[in-house]
Structure formats: C-alpha cells, structure tokens
Amino acid sequence: MEKIISFDRQGRIYLPEELRRYLVFKTFIAKIKDRGLYLEPIEEDPLEELSKLGRGKLKVKSIAQIKKEAREEVKEYAQKKIRRY
C-alpha cells in the first residue's frame, strides 16, 4: 500500500486512516534508511511484553542475574550496530 503524506510545521506526520487501520502497533522507532524513513514497530509496554514472555523463566533467576544478562545483551546488540556503520 502506498500513500503520499506530508508533515506540518511542527514536523508531525499525518497517516491517513486506511494506513492506521493496517498498523497493528501504535509506537515506532523512526530510522533513516537510504533516502527514506523507516518506522520499526515496538510494543506499547516493553516491560509488560517481557513479563509475558518470561513469567516462568524469571522465577528461577535473581534480579542481579537478570540485570547481568540484560547488560550483556545490550552490549552485544550495540557492538553489532556499531560494526554495521
């Protein structure tokens, strides 16, 4: 689906209703790719989504262990992103 859209003086982009109906998510990360703008969907409440995914798994780990693993994942992700550029 393609639509011509524009933004106002404040930089807000208006998405027509037919595009909004198509979208499942309401929150996005905006990225510049090549000569365009890419909107990557993210969950409304990432913590809630994490709790859904790990309800059983989180019970067997300490908060310190969860923090350590999260830091390691963020570090790995950042290193991958830096290597791309």
Image: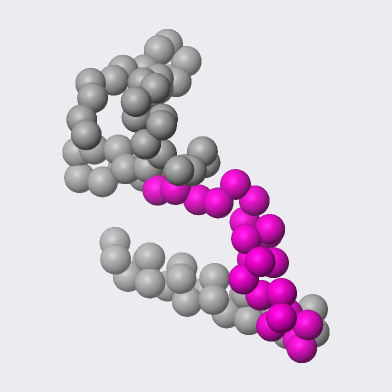
Query: Picture quarter containing residue 48?
Result: bottom right
Res 67 seen here: no
For residue 56, above or below residue 24 = below
* Quarter placement of the C terminus: bottom left
Q: Residue at x 20, y 45 (%)?
A: 34
The residue positioned 63% from the left and 81% from the top of the image is 69
Which percent across, then down, holds residue 2? Answer: 20, 30
Q: State which quadrant residue 67 falls in.
A: bottom right
Residue 48 forms part of the magenta stretch: yes
Residue 21 position in % (x across, y down): 41, 31
Horizontal relation, residue 23 to residue 83: left or right = right
Q: Looking at the image, which is closer to me, 14 or 78?
A: 14
Please indicate, yes or no, whether residue 37 appears anywhere in the rendered image: yes
Instruction: Answer left or right for 71 relative to 81.
Output: right
Residue sitting at x 48%, y 43%: 25
Q: Is residue 4 above or below residue 64?
A: above
Compared with residue 50, is residue 71 higher up or lower down, i.e. above or below? below
Span of residues in magenta: 40-61
Quarter residue 17 falls in: top left
In this rendering, is residue 15 above or below 33? above
For this rendering, which residue is in front, 72 or 13? 13
In this view, the residue in front, 19 or 62, is: 19
Quarter of the image with the N terminus in it: top left
Residue 80: percent from left, percent from top:
38, 72
From the viewer's perspective, tell me whether residue 71 is left or right of residue 61: left
Along the horizontal axis of the image, is 80 left or right of 76?
A: left
Q: Residue at x 55, y 51 (%)?
A: 43
**Residue 10 is one of the magenta-drawn residues:** no
